[in-house]
């Protein structure tokens, strides 16, 4: 069965928002979310799908979005509720406010397939940024305008050799040297596109895809 991952933004970075992942896993299990597997300390919880105890509005039998391919409205709600539930646990148990986003196996695979074949062999230099696709007409229009602008600027070489692939629900950023001082960091993408995202490097994304039942290359 395909799984899905809840990506948590901004925990265990330096001395801020410290969360023991083993305790978070136990708290999720106690809240009837199932027992996820935690990968690294940066906020990756891999769940079997569908998430126990987080039914979609249409009932427990709703299709899980992790299986990929569109899915139903109820299926989307399963992932949203799971992420919201984890965010609630972080706030109540750990006093941490963090954005959480559910990404299913199908979506992970699609993102991996969008990575250019000539990406740097150093997987830490390629980052995948995930966000919820824009919903309302205004958000869609802002995203489209921001996407066009970012791609045009990237084409002009204004990002110092860093490259960009932009899709409706994710980006692939190929850094030439490092993400730390790049003009193509997460804040720039969020401002231009009107989204809130979270980034993982290519190595981490491949591991998460495998843990969700897929392949590291997205095929």
Image (tube, rainbow, N blue to C red):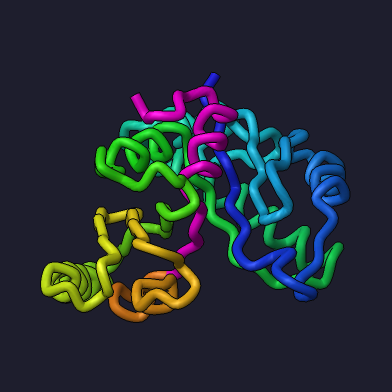
Rendering quarter of residue 39: top right
Residue 205 lies in the magenta stretch: yes
* Horizontal arrangement in the rendering, residue 63 relative to residue 166 (left or right): right
Quadrant where the N terminus lies? Answer: top right
Percent across and percent down for residue 215 are 45, 24
Percent across and percent down for residue 18 are 81, 67
Residue 37 visible in the current orientation: yes
Percent across and percent down for residue 125 are 43, 55
User: Magenta part of the protein: which range?
Assistant: 196-219
Residue 137 visible in the current orientation: no
| Residue depicted at x 26% and y 74% | 159
Rendering quarter of residue 207: top right
Classify 34 as above or below 19.
above
* Horizontal arrangement in the rendering, residue 157 relative to residue 184 (left or right): left
Residue 21 lies in the magenta stretch: no
Quadrant where the C terminus lies? Answer: top left
In this rendering, the count of numbered labels is 0
């Amino acid at each position: 069965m395909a799984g899905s991952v809840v990506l948590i933004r901004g925990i265990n970075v330096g001395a801020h928002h410290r969360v023991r992942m083993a305790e978070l896993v136990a708290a999720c299990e106690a809240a009837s979310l199932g027992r996820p597997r935690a990968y690294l300390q940066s906020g990756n919880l891999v769940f079997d799908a569908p998430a126990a105890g987080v039914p979609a509005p249409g009932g427990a039998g709703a299709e899980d979005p992790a299986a990929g391919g569109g899915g139903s409205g109820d299926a989307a709600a399963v992932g949203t509720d799971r992420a919201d539930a984890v965010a609630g646990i972080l706030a109540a148990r750990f006093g941490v406010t963090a954005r959480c986003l559910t990404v299913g196996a199908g979506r992970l695979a699609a993102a991996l397939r969008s990575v250019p074949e000539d990406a740097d062999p150093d997987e830490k230099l390629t980052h995948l940024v995930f966000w919820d696709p824009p919903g309302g007409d205004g958000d869609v229009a802002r995203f489209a305008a921001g996407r066009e602008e970012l791609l045009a600027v990237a084409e002009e070489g204004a990002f110092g050799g860093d490259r960009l692939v932009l899709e409706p629900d994710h980006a692939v950023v190929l850094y030439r040297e490092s993400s730390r001082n790049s003009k193509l960091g997460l804040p720039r993408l969020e401002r231009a596109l009107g989204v809130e995202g979270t980034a993982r490097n290519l190595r981490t994304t491949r591991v998460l895809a495998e843990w969700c039942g897929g392949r590291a290359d997205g095929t």
